[in-house]
Amino acid sequence: MEIFAVAFVLLCEYQGSEVNGASGWISFAYLILHAYVAVILGVMRLLLWLWQYVFAYFF
């Protein structure tokens, strides 16, 4: 799935450079979106680990 997303971003970058548009914003937004997703997944993993630790400790 991520390969298709990267291909789409590269296609948009190429088309944006052909018309001298703001193609750099697409890759910037793509990287920011990935950073947000990585942080959210990291927090979810931490909460899940904490839940498993607390559940195993008390029960």
Image (cartoon, helix red, strand yellow):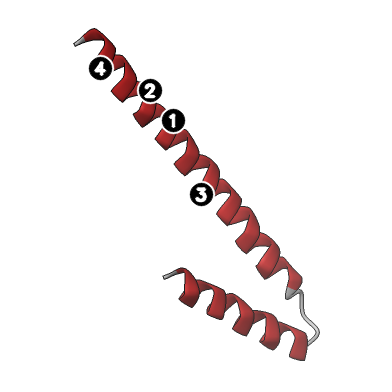
Circles 1, 2 touching at the beta carbon (< 8 Å): yes
Question: How busy is the neighbourhood of tag 3: few (under 14 within 10 Å), some, or many (20 plus)?
Answer: few
Pick the quarter of the image with the N terminus: bottom left
Q: CA distance from mark 2 to mark 3?
A: 20 Å
Name the foreground residue: 32 vs 42.
42
Q: Is residue 51 above or below residue 3?
A: above
- Marks 1 and 2 sit apart, C-alpha to C-alpha, by 6 Å
Q: Which mark is residue 37?
A: 3
On residue 50, the disc is: 2
- Residue 8 percent coordinates (x, y): 54, 79
Q: In the rendered picture of this protein, how many numbered marks are placed on residues?
A: 4
Q: Is residue 51 above or below residue 58?
A: below
Quadrant assignment, res 31: bottom right
Badge 1: residue crowd in 10 Å (few <14, some 14–19, many ≥20): few
Find disc 1 in the rendering and name its residue. 46
The earlier-in-sequence mark between 3 and 1 is: 3
Camera-side mark, 3 or 1: 1
